[in-house]
Image: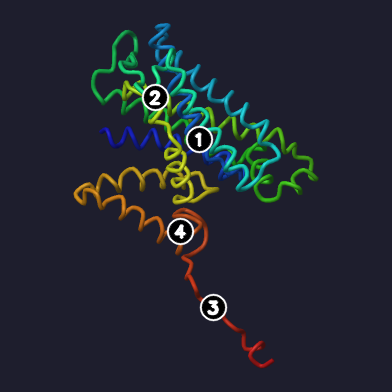
Amino acid sequence: MHLIITLGIFGILALGLEIPLGLTGLFSMGHAAFYGMGAYVSALLAMKLGFSFWLCLIFSMTSAGLMGLALGFPCLRLKGDYLAIATLGFGEIFRICMVNWDTLTRGPMGLPGIPRPSIFGLYFTTRMPYYYLILIFFILAFLIAWRLPHTYLGRAFKAIRDDEDAAGFMGVHVAKYKIIAFVMGGVYAGLAGSFYAHYITFISPDTFMYQDSCLALCMVFLGGAGTIIGPVVGAFILVVIPEVLRFLVEWRMLVVGVIMVVMMIYRPQGVMGSGGFKIPFKKPGVSPMNQAK
């Protein structure tokens, strides 16, 4: 049950990264900051002000979306590696702020005792309610993401991804849609972070390090960037396989790493990407006409 709940959390997180990365082509490596913002806002509102889980959830998604807005503006002119470095630095700034703002966040000691969710006064005391709740959240998040590429907004995202300059010439407001992509990704991550905080009931700055951004990135690329089902498949692979290989103890992550390397060599478009397997180091064939010449 815990494995399925974790898969749901990371599935939503990966879907959130798919919007700026897979659909819009924005190489963001600061997704853990949005995830952490959702978790910290939800935890602090519940612990300090006594807000219900549902209010905390709304504020978490809103604050993470606003963080995406704040990140989007200064990064509008950045592309590729430069954008990746800038967003990675943004994620580290967030983590360092959470470490040093100890009067509010208790610094490295973290926030224990986060209240559990409740419905009509009944608190979640077992994992079963969490399972049903994350299932509902995941289905809603997936359906919205699934519909997105078929809307004008999604087509604008894909136009920017394919050719930003051409999209601008065709009347797409590139800056606006880039910011929207960051905001939507932040909202998804805020949802995942809020649920995580109330499920685990403890968070600390070390929970939202750059490794979490890299993990979400791997989920998107491994499953297939640009496909909505891809990040979900990537999340399944990177959450479930390490648990299946738990009997290998310290070797299991090595096996997972080898699987990822092999996949990126032979199928760089991801598991759900279009096209067949790639044969590396294969020389292109020579046509009979070229041979005659």
Q: Earlier in the sequence, mark 2 or mark 3?
A: 2
Residue identifier under label 2: 195
In the rendered structure, which amino acid carries the disc numbered 2? Phe
**36 with respect to 116 (left or right):** right
Calculate the distance from the C-alpha at mark 3 to the C-alpha at mark 1. 38 Å
Check disc 1 and report its element: helix, strand or loop.
helix
Q: Earlier in the sequence, mark 4 or mark 2?
A: 2
Q: Residue at x 54, y 78 (%)?
A: 283
Mark 2 vs mark 1: give the one in front: 1
* Labels 2 and 3 touching (C-beta < 8 A): no
How packed mark 3 is, by other alpha carbons closer than 10 Å (few <14, some 14-19, many 20 or more), is few
Calculate the distance from the C-alpha at mark 2 to the C-alpha at mark 3. 50 Å
**285 with respect to 240 (left or right):** right
Residue 195 lies in what quarter of the image?
top left
Relative image position of residue 79 (x, y in whole percent): 65, 45
In the rendered structure, which amino acid carries the disc numbered 4? Met
Q: Residue at x 33, y 53 (%)?
A: 256
Q: Earlier in the sequence, mark 2 or mark 1?
A: 1
Relative image position of residue 124 (x, y in whole percent): 28, 17
Check disc 4 and report its element: helix, strand or loop.
helix
Residue identifier under label 4: 264
Check disc 2 and report its element: helix, strand or loop.
helix
Residue identifier under label 3: 283
